[in-house]
Image (cartoon, helix red, strand yellow):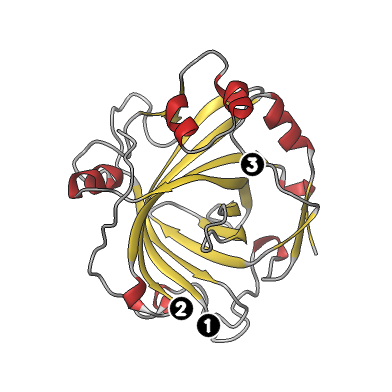
Amino acid sequence: MSWNNATSYVRDIVNKRAAKHGLYESQSNEDRDLPLGVRIGALVTLQKAPFIEAALNGSLITEPEGNALPIRAVSRVHLNLSGKLYRYFLHTGDDDEQQTYLQVLLDAHGNVTEVLYCTQLTRIVPESAEDQDAYMGLSGAGLGDSTYTLWRAQLAELGAAEADLAAAFGTSDQLVYSRDAGDPAQAFVAPFTGHETRIDDAAGEHGLAQRLHFMPYARKMGSGREYLLIATEIVDSRDGDASRRAIHVDFTIAIPLDVNRISIQ
């Protein structure tokens, strides 16, 4: 796949109600009964050790600022996989800020099996229909290929600090991530597809509804792994307004956290 600079491209598909995707049933207190006891406005405290280790091993993750971090929004991600996936947003990324969230995966029995701390690396808009198809994996190539490469020069163009690039790349000009889904021997695996409903307040009056084409990639980093999550997101509505449709591709860096070392208040 190639990394393309952005121009606008949207699809005329309408979804006026975020609740249509069924995050929760009630029309009030929409953020109740979430895994880890999360609610909008709650404060999450994360141990520094995983971020120190990640930095020492050249991770591209952005370390959180401060100790008690407020949860500003929550979402339920419905994908064609077993279990349930939630995202707890520390920053939504709606105001040109770096999108940051905890991604929580539950198994079919409702047990938390994975928590990732995720920070947005960049966001692009496909500049052609062909690029859009590639980032959706619609032609049997692109998103879903066995590897994805980040190039040092590309990150430099995005404004990454030279010290950060030196820590992550060393003397190399590229970082190669392997697909973290399907048979590694297969050259292509179709991306996960589904939809996400995000609510930005406890009453569920504000938020967004979008469709996803999603694939996780990973690379070995120290004793663990760093993830590169790539998702084509087709925004169908914001705050119930279908005129605010958009399409973009998010590149997100993530590292795993120990669920037992996350405090929610």
Does label 3 or label 2 sit earlier along the sequence?
Answer: 3
Q: Can the viewer see residue 179 in this picture?
A: no
Q: Residues within 10 Å of mark 1 (few under 14, many from 20)?
A: some
User: How many angstroms separate mark 1 from mark 3 (CA)?
Assistant: 30 Å
Measuring 63% from the left and 82% from the top, which residue is drawn there? 29
Badge 3 vs badge 2, beta-carbon distance below 8 Å: no
Measuring 70% from the left and 60% from the top, which residue is drawn there? 36
- Label 1 sits on what residue type? Glu
User: How many angstroms separate mark 3 from mark 2 (CA)?
Assistant: 29 Å
For mark 3, give the secondary structure: loop
**Residue 113, numbered circle:** none
Residue farthest along the bottom direction in this orientation: 27
Q: Quadrant of the N terminus?
A: top left
Left or right position of 137 against 196: left
- Residue 224: image x %, image y %? 63, 28
According to the image, label 3 marks what residue? 62
Could you say which quadrant of the image residue 111 lies in? bottom right
- Residue 93: image x %, image y %? 53, 58
Query: Is residue 184 positioned above or below 138 on the image?
Result: above
Badge 1 vs badge 2, beta-carbon distance below 8 Å: yes
User: How many angstroms separate mark 1 from mark 2 (CA)?
Assistant: 7 Å
According to the image, label 1 marks what residue? 205
For mark 2, give the secondary structure: loop
